Image (tube, rainbow, N blue to C red):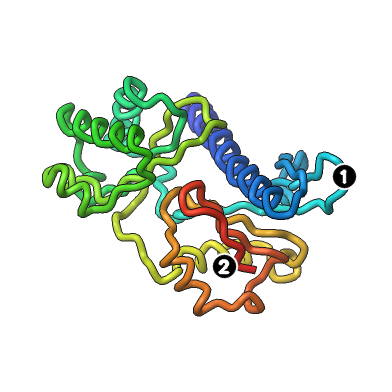
Amino acid sequence: MLQNGGENAGRLEYMDKTEHIERDFCDHLGLYINARTGADYYADKNSIEDDDVDFFLVSRSGGFPRHSLQVVTIPFDYALREDRDSIGKLKSNLSIKLKECVQDRCLVTLFLSQSGRTRRWNAAEIDKLASLVCQMSASGSPSLSYASIRSYSPELSDLVHRVSFFPSPALEEVVVSVVMGGFIPQGGERIAEAIDKKRRKYGMEGTKNISLVIGALGLVGHAEIEAFQQTHPPATLPFHEVWVVSLYDGTVQLK
């Protein structure tokens, strides 16, 4: 019973953090639309559980139509939902270190190598990674590639292939997330997978009146978006609207 209680508590904590991050993306979309249309939208969480709609964009004055939003973040399928002991300790120890130098509440995402996922990190390696992330925070860098990490420390690049830094004021602390691999496809595959995931869940009929917000955690650039657009014309996409929202690369409407 105690184990189940711990699992439930962990799931509730994960869901709460997910909601904060998803709200950030919806707020950002509202601000983007407001700046371009003169609207006055804000994001409002749907109070109905297990509904197709996650958030609404609501007009403060009532002068603009409401938007129903479904949110998906990418990369979603690489996430380690249940931490093994080594991963859990890495996240915990790194979070403690980052609180000493990172002032902003943020989500730090690590793309670990197989070695970085399967063995314990020593204190020196965690210190070196924390120092690198602190430099990212100070310089405003949204992500570091494998080449950049290797230039900083060849030993560290054997353990982590990519790091992203995503400021999120809605979070209550520094949150470290670990994903499964270091390779980031540039052909638009992750955008296509995100859309297809929701299409398979809700069907074409269930998505026709909903706008899909694809929240990019600092990991989707213009090259990937352009590659996706070349092979996926708007008319072929489900949903009423499809948006890619990134606090770093801006907001792009795909449909």
Q: Nearer the viewer, mark 1 or mark 2?
A: 1
How many C-alpha atoms fall within 10 Å of the one at disc 1: few (<14), some, or many (≥20)? Answer: few
Secondary structure beneath label 1: loop
Give the residue displayed 73% in from the left and 60% down from the top.
210
Label total for image:
2
Does residue 62 appear left or right of residue 188 in this picture? right
Disc 2 marks a residue whose amino acid type is Asp
Disc 1 marks a residue whose amino acid type is Gly
Q: Nearer the viewer, residue 22 or 226?
A: 226
How many C-alpha atoms fall within 10 Å of the one at disc 2: few (<14), some, or many (≥20)? Answer: some
Q: Nearer the viewer, residue 140 or 178?
A: 140
Does residue 56 appear left or right of residue 197 in this picture? right
Image coordinates of residue 51 in percent, x first then y, are 74, 50
* Quarter of the image where one finds residue 200: bottom right
Q: Is residue 178 visible?
A: no
Give the residue displayed 57% in from the left and 65% down from the top.
195
Give the residue displayed 36% in from the left and 22% down from the top.
99
Give the residue displayed 68% in from the left and 64% down from the top.
241
Q: Is residue 27 above or below residue 202?
A: above
